[in-house]
Image (tube, grey):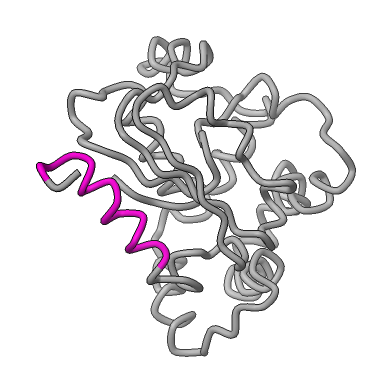
């Protein structure tokens, strides 16, 4: 499993909850299981500034901004999160097709409202939420990667090492948040390292 941002969150959650289904993990941003209790406490001003969009989406006005200006908002965030990445219009346009999904705005707004305590989660998943709240370690072989210019992970996540109890390596790459796009060779190398660990080549 490998992913970043919401994909990284999903990969870490699966590895933590069902290690029997995951051979290995590449996680951008370290142990990326959302700590809901910590999310609901005030953070350092620099991080609060970086996640301004999450606060915006707590209000109906913010939801309307996303509904009305989804491409402009998301493009602004891409620039904010990866300040040296020079993506082209074609790449953004391919991704932006997903913003037209009928549930895009509802899912994004609810996710950030739930994380900050302003919306209830699905009762069907309460037991899983309780397990994740206990911060279970990730036991499968894992490579974690940080981008030096990622404003969403200020200072990096090397200190997450204790959450990985299997074979683990932490790397730092001189890019922003969109590491698989900005440094695809480094991302692929991390996946190949985990693959080697989980086969006879490791």
Please name whichever residue, 180 or 35, is drawn nearer the observer in this view of the structure.
Answer: 180
- Picture coordinates of residue 123 (x, y %)? 42, 15
- Picture coordinates of residue 121 (x, y %)? 50, 24
Residue 169 placement, left or right of 42: left
Within the image, what quadrant is residue 128 found in? Answer: top left
Pick the quarter of the image with the N terminus: top left
- Residue at the image position 51 percent from the left and 11 percent from the top: 134
Within the image, what quadrant is residue 75 found in? Answer: bottom right
Residue 135, compared with residue 72, is above or below; it is above
Which residue is the extreme one toward the right?
45
Please name whichever residue, 99 or 15, is drawn nearer the observer in this view of the structure.
Answer: 15
Looking at the magenta stretch, what is its main secondary structure?
A: helix
Which residue is the extreme one toward the front?
201
The residue segment tinted magenta is: 186-200
Within the image, what quadrant is residue 15 found in? Answer: top left
Which residue is the extreme one toward the bottom?
89
Asked whether 189 falls inside the magenta stretch, the response is: yes
- Residue at the image position 58 percent from the left and 74 percent from the top: 71
Residue 74, compared with residue 143, is above or below; it is below
- Residue at the image position 41 percent from the left and 49 percent from the top: 7
- Picture coordinates of residue 125 (x, y %)? 38, 18
Pick the quarter of the image with the C terminus: top left
- Picture coordinates of residue 53 (x, y %)? 72, 53
């Amino acid at each position: 499993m490998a992913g970043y941002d919401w994909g990284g969150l999903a990969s870490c959650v699966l590895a933590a909850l069902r290690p029997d289904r995951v051979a290995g993990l590449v996680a951008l941003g370290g142990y990326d299981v959302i700590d809901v209790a910590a999310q609901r406490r005030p953070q350092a001003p620099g991080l609060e500034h970086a996640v301004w969009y999450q606060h915006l989406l707590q209000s109906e006005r913010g939801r309307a901004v996303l509904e009305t200006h989804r491409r402009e908002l998301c493009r602004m965030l891409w620039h904010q999160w990866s300040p040296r990445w020079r993506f082209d219009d074609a790449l953004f346009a391919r991704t932006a097709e997903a913003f037209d999904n009928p549930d895009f705005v509802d899912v994004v707004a609810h996710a950030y409202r739930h994380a900050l305590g302003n919306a209830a989660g699905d009762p069907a998943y309460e037991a899983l939420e309780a397990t994740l709240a206990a911060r279970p370690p990730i036991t499968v072989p894992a490579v974690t990667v940080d981008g030096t210019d990622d404003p969403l992970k200020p200072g990096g996540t090397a200190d997450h090492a204790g959450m990985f109890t299997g074979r683990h390596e932490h790397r730092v790459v001189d890019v922003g948040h969109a590491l698989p796009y900005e440094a695809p060779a480094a991302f692929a190398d991390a996946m190949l390292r985990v693959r080697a660990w989980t086969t006879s080549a490791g």
